[in-house]
Amino acid sequence: MPLARPELLGPLRRALQLRRHGAALLLVGAAGTGKTHLAHQFAREVGGQQFTWKASSGLTALGRQVPGESPVGTPVTAQGMAARLKAAAPLLLLLEDLHEAPETERQMLSELAALAPRLRGVVLLATSRAAEAAWPLGSFRPLDAAEAAALFQSQFGQVPPTGLLEWVQVRAAGNSLFLLEYWRALARSGSLYNDGQRWHWRTPPSERLPDSLEALILQALQAAGDDLALLSARAAEPTAGPSEWAALAGVSLGELEQGQRRLTRAGLLQDAGFAHPLYREVLLGRLTPETRTALARRALALPTGQQPRRVAEHLRYAAWPAAETLHALGVAAEAAERGGEMGLAGELLAQAARLADADERPGLALKAAQRLQNHALGAALELALLALADPAHLALAAPLAAQLSARLGGLVALQGVLDRMPESAATQRAVCEMQARHGMGDHRGVLELWSASPRLQVSRDPGVVLPVLLSLLAVGRAADVQTLLPTLETVPLTPDQQARLGSVRMLLHYQRGENAEAARAAGELERLLSASGQTLARAGVLHNRAVFLQRVGELEDAAESARQAADLRRALGDLRGAASSLGLQGELAFERGQLSEAEDAVSTALDTLELYGPSHFQLNMLSMLARLHAHAAEKLSPLLAVHFARRALEMADTLGNRRLWVETVPDAAQAHLSAGEAGEALRLADLALADEDGVSSDPRLRSQCRAVRGLAQAALGERAAALESLNEALALAEAHADETGARHIRLELARLSGDVAALRAHLVWFEEHGNGFGALKARRFLTPLEAPEVQRPSLTLTVLSGAPTVADRTVRGERRQALLLALLEARLLGQAEASSLSLLDLLYAGQPEQAAQTALKQVVSQLRRQHGAELIWTTAHGYALGAVQTDAEQFLAKGDSRLWRSALPAFEAEAVGVALRQRLRQALGQTLISPSADLLEAGRAAGLLLESDPYDQPTLKLALLVLQQVSDHRRMGRTYAGASARLSEVGEHLPERWQDFLGQGQQENKNT
């Protein structure tokens, strides 16, 4: 554990080794800071003769510890103890928890510490929560982020996952013991887990204090003794001065001073404040209602207790009559607003609204919602809906409620708000819906509403024009934006509307490829929004700024901007926005070469975004996962890349935004390239480049599409065409100052030409600019992996043809089968092993750990005896498949459907099933265009694919097309009827006839 002055341990060690002098050191710090740990660590390192004394045991016990004789009944003195220590040297005397000793004993030990330098070979090492006279001090401080990371690594064997330290540090405040307890609690609850390769974490569903940590704090609070009332008063009013604190506690200033000293010595207070913020939190939670009410009423009479923030807390417990409480809340809200604390003003008004009568409640609720919309979105929505109960507030409450409901709950929640608006307010309803749909990223919906209303098309209302401008930009219609912009030139704008207009101009720069100018504009706008307290808009601008900075290669600044955006959105309760910014953090991690961290962030973001229905935010995450897997090195990566690319393109079609479809193509085409499907990659790139509306306004997108077209041509052997496409892409990137994009294209050109010197130069450039992904690609191009000589596997594991078999012998027993599947799954996911911990959770959940470990070893031993010792290898932290070839790996490599004969095995990881289905889908796709295909086998495999993915319409379409190839129309009818019934159970309805379903799909393909 780190000392503020770590050099102080040197003299202690030298005193024991050289015996020319003695030394003393008092380690001082709050409970849990690591004092005792460090003292015992030092004792283990130096060895030799040692004695330990606990302050609570009394000096008589200390006298018995140290060698030497004293007449019976003779009191222990500093001089007498010094003589006995000197005679027994060399020795180390550990004095634990010196603060617990009575004052007379502490005084004697201070005298002994003063004598220590004269005692050759004697070291006194003590721990205490308070400083003592005559002792040299080693003061502990809270751990910083780097020290907390080192502590995690020492306890868990690996670096902490991204985001974990920040989350825990806010709560543990650098206390090493509290950090450990939080980590252990997170691990027990499953929020901190290890996949066999590294640690991952997810934010726990509640922020409840771990039971073990609460118990530790309650134990520490017992040291308050008779001063508990004094400590409780401090908890109720932590900013009160001495006279106010004394009045609140009902003691004199002299009694306060003495009590404060005792509480400081006990380690509960530090500089008149709590030694750790969790002490206050736990203490307040343990106060009786009567005590809390009495303290709240007394605090409200103090000057500090009348501060708006303190009023908000005290009134919750003061139990005043409603009229008095309402008056106090109103006064406090006005004071908070004058001080610029709009969020606090909103909280106070929200409390007032809950207490007010029916006539006053809607007005107070609207005021509260307006002030909370940049601080707590959920509370603001609840209050805005309350305000809608009064028609007099419709004009202001409806737009606010609509925007908040759409952002927090999607289209269903939005429709619920719109249905509460009267039919007479049709235009106002349309404006509300436009603004709300823009806030949730439904740009097509905004433009459809605008186009459907001639009145809205000629409106100069900024509330109409601004969402339209931003939606036009989002779909790539920059020319229409330039036409519409002048309508706002003479219209007065609110600060919020001025900020939105600033966003329009900022995004225009971005779409022209002027990324540096866009980043500069975003920085200026963010500062204005911060000064005006527009937190929600500020978070959006921070997110966009991160994108612009990413485009100009300033990855660290971009990551910081994305982090701030995610933090702000999370604090607001904007979970969808926070997920989008988390996904951007993942994208930036990818560019820095941190592929695992990137996948964690993007996958977590996607899990959240899927709760809100299709959106361009979700599309971005799917596209990013396609990119990640296209460049990863695991066996399943190419298949997963194609899977996510397919989902991304389908979602772009669902959203009806052609520009988004084109933006998805570079990642989707790269995914198909990684899977060896250069023809499909070229088809997608050609479709994108033919769509002038989709790419015309964005030079960067045009460059990306041409670049991936060139890579597809190169993979198809069209070298001259590939070089032409890549050089066109390079010229576009260079013309629009996209240095990073240009560098990636030059890297590909160097690879195609085999220019080793150029590849090395590009590697240096990427490393110097912090672009880990570019450096990763350069290294791969420079040193292609050579397959090492591997002993030919002597065993074959079959899992795709019913019960697992090894060398044609069926594996008996559910646990044995599950173990082999888990080991195969680990291999397919590119993991070196399946950890013993994960296997115990899978096979023996809920059983005592020792018994489960014994049972696992027995299962492994039985499998080795029955099928050969090479079947399973023991690894550092678990087990792995040994010298075994598997039908699953053969199927993934060759796509031979004859290898897959039964239902999909019960793999735990969804990615494995996704990859197997995707490979079978690819094989069947080849069947449709191959004149020599085995159509009967294809028909069987089509049924198998549909059985494994029964609710996927593209899978149904593929299965029907294969059956159509074999002219099995009767089976087509049965298959379609069964699928239609299944889908109708989950709310999806197909055309009545399969002919119409296939005709619809073929027409969609033709349009595409």
Image: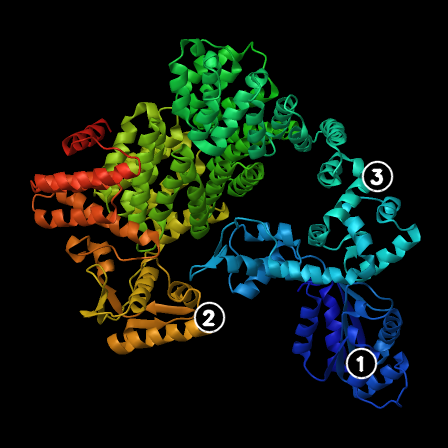
Q: Position of residue 986 (x, y in %)?
A: 30, 38
User: Tag 3: residue type?
Assistant: Leu
Residue type indicated by callout 1:
Leu
Q: In the image, what residue occupies the spot 34% across and 72% down?
A: 873
Position of the N terminus by quadrant: bottom right
Q: Disc 1 on helix, strand or loop?
A: helix
The residue that mark 2 highlights is 848
Looking at the picture, which amino acid does disc 2 mark?
Pro
Which mark is first along the chain, 3 or 1?
1
Quadrant containing the C terminus is top left
In front here: 855 or 987? 987
Q: Nearer the viewer, residue 132 or 676?
A: 132
> Compared to 610, does 428 lie above or below?
above
**Circle 2: element type:** loop
Say whether marks 1 and 3 touch (CB < 8 Å).
Answer: no
Question: Label 1: which residue?
Answer: 62
Image x and y of residue 546, in percent: 51, 36
Residue 130 percent location from the top left of the image: 80, 63
Cα separation, mark 1 vs mark 2, equals 42 Å
Please tell me which of labels 1 and 2 falls first in the chain: 1
Q: Are marks 1 and 2 in contact (CB under 8 Å)?
A: no
| Sequence order check, earlier mark of 3 and 2 | 3
Numbered badge on residue 302: 3
Q: Position of residue 174 (x, y in %)?
A: 66, 56
Q: Is 552 on the left or on the right of 701, as rendered?
A: right
Q: What kind of element bears circle 3?
A: loop
948 displayed left or right of 565: left
Q: Residue at x 49, y 33 (%)?
A: 408
